[in-house]
Amino acid sequence: MEGKVLARIVAIAFAAIAITATVIEVTREEAPVPASTAPALQPSADPLRATLRRCQQLGEAASSDADCLAAWAESRDRFLGRTPSPEGPQRPGDQ
């Protein structure tokens, strides 16, 4: 009989400790996350990015703007890892 009583006391103590730890964890406030340093590594002013933002604000009118078309071509080349050709884009059949 002594063993059963001791086991119940240990089980109750364990449950009380587990509940207390859970309550403390739930009520604890999170420390503020430190600011990321990645933006500091980027250049402060990217003219292509600024042009793309301007084109975004133009909306549908940007499809006929030469600066926007050039910016989109440069952005596409950067994304695809291509080096821009000095003579401009080639059309099929131009030679």
Image: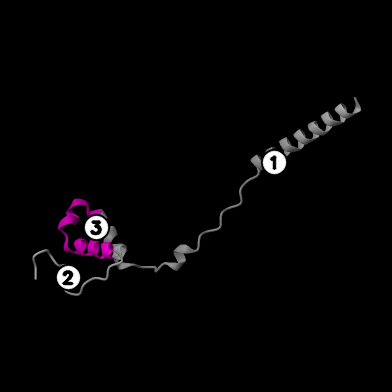
**Residue 46 lies in what quarter of the image?**
bottom left
What secondary structure prevails in the magenta region?
helix
Asked if residue 86 is positioned above or below residue 70 in the image, the reply reads below
Between the residue at mark 1 and the residue at mark 3, the CA separation in whole angstroms equals: 52 Å
For image coordinates 27% across by 65% down, the residue present is 77
**Residue 23 lies in what quarter of the image?**
top right
* Badge 2: residue crowd in 10 Å (few <14, some 14–19, many ≥20): few
Residue picked out by circle 3: 55
* Badge 3: residue crowd in 10 Å (few <14, some 14–19, many ≥20): many
Q: Which residues are magenta?
A: 57-77
Asked if residue 56 is positioned above or below residue 88 in the image, the reply reads above
Give the percent coordinates (x, y) of residue 51: 27, 63
Inspect the magenta stretch and tell me whether residue 53 lies in it.
no
In this image, 90 relative to 84: left or right? left
Give the percent coordinates (x, y) of residue 15: 75, 33
Q: Residue 24 got which mark?
A: 1
Between the residue at mark 1 and the residue at mark 2, the CA separation in whole angstroms equals: 65 Å
- The amino acid marked with disc number 3 is Cys
Question: Which of disc 2 and disc 1 is earlier in sequence?
Answer: 1
For image coordinates 46% across by 66% down, the residue present is 40
For image coordinates 16% across by 67% down, the residue present is 89
- The amino acid marked with disc number 1 is Ile
Badge 3 element: helix
Question: Which of disc 2 and disc 3 is earlier in sequence?
Answer: 3
